[in-house]
Image (cartoon, rainbow, N blue to C red):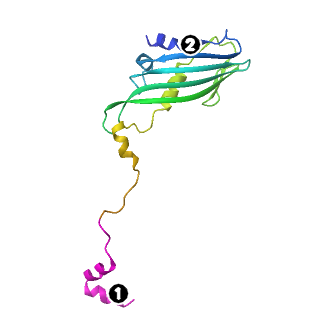
C-alpha cells in the first residue's frame, strides 16, 4: 500500500524533451503513512513542481502548500500547522548516484524515472518549527524578555541608612 502511494510521485524523465514541464501532486494522510518514521500522521495539501530538463541536468523547483497536524510541545494538544515553502534541487547526470550537497545530486544518465516523494517529504519536515506550539500559546512567546527585578521600587540610600546597625555605621566612617 505505502509503495503504491509513493509511485504516484514518479516522473518518467527519460522520455522527456528538454525544456520546462509542470506537475501537480496532491498530498494526504496516506502520503505520510508511507514514511513510518514520520512525525506527521495527518496532513493534506498540494505540491507544484516545475521540472527543467537540459542535456546535463534536471532542475526541480517545488512549491509546497500543506497543512499538517502537529502535537504541541507544551500541552500535547493537536493543532493544524500550515506549511508554505519553495525549494530547489538540481539533479546532474553522471556515472554513479551521489549526493554532492543538500541541493545537488548526481544521478545515472540512464535513469528512467525519478520519484519526488522523498524530496517532498524532506522539504515538509525541514519546514516544521523546532518548537511546536499550539496557536493559543503563541501570544505567550511574543515577549521573550527576561525580567531580573520585581515590580517593587528599589530601596533608596536613605532607607538603607536607617536600617544599618550602628556598629556598621562606625565602620563605614573609617573609610
Given residues 113 and 146, the one toward you in this image is 146
Q: Write the residue at 26% across / 82% down.
A: 162
Circles 1 and 2, Cβ within 8 Å, touching? The answer is: no
Q: Secondary structure at mark 1?
A: helix
Residue 103 in the image: x percent, y percent? 62, 29
How many numbered marks have been drawn onto this rendered protein structure? 2
Pointer 1 or 2: first along the chain: 2
Residue 137 in the image: x percent, y percent? 34, 41
In the picture provided, is 40 more to the left or to the right than 107?
left
Given residues 118 and 139, the one toward you in this image is 139
The N terminus: image quadrant: top left
In the displayed structure, 154 sits above or below 99; it is below
Q: CA distance from mark 1 to mark 2?
A: 84 Å
Give the magenta-colored segment's residue range.
152-175
Q: How many neighbours does mark 1 have within 10 angstroms: few (below 14), some (14-19), or many (20 or more)?
A: few
Disc ID at residue 145: none
Q: Which corner quadrant of the image does residue 60 belong to?
A: top right
What residue would you read off at disc 1? Answer: 172
Residue 50 in the image: x percent, y percent? 61, 20
Q: Secondary structure at mark 2?
A: strand
Residue 102 in the image: x percent, y percent? 60, 30
Q: Write the residue at 34% across / 63% down.
A: 149
Q: How many neighbours does mark 2 have within 10 angstroms: few (below 14), some (14-19), or many (20 or more)?
A: few
The C terminus: image quadrant: bottom left
In the displayed structure, 75 sits above or below 66; it is below
What residue would you read off at disc 2? Answer: 10
Q: Which corner quadrant of the image does residue 78 belong to?
A: top left
In the picture provided, is 145 more to the left or to the right than 60?
left
Amino acid at each position: 500500500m505505502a509503495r503504491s502511494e509513493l509511485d504516484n510521485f514518479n516522473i518518467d524523465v527519460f522520455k522527456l524533451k528538454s525544456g520546462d514541464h509542470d506537475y501537480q501532486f496532491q498530498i494526504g494522510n496516506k502520503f505520510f503513512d508511507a514514511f513510518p518514521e514520520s512525525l506527521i500522521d495527518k496532513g493534506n495539501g498540494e505540491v507544484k513542481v516545475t521540472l527543467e530538463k537540459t542535456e546535463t541536468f534536471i532542475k526541480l523547483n517545488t512549491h509546497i502548500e500543506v497543512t499538517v497536524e502537529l502535537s504541541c510541545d507544551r500541552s500535547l494538544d493537536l493543532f493544524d500547522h500550515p506549511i508554505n515553502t519553495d525549494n530547489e534541487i538540481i539533479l546532474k547526470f553522471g556515472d554513479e548516484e551521489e549526493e554532492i550537497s543538500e541541493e545537488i545530486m548526481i544521478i545515472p544518465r540512464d535513469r528512467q524515472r525519478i520519484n519526488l516523494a522523498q524530496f517532498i517529504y524532506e522539504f515538509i519536515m525541514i519546514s516544521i518549527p523546532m518548537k511546536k506550539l499550539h496557536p493559543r500559546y503563541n501570544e505567550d512567546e511574543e515577549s521573550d524578555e527576561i525580567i531580573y527585578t520585581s515590580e517593587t521600587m528599589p530601596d533608596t540610600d536613605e532607607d538603607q541608612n536607617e536600617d544599618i546597625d550602628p556598629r556598621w555605621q562606625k565602620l563605614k566612617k573609617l573609610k
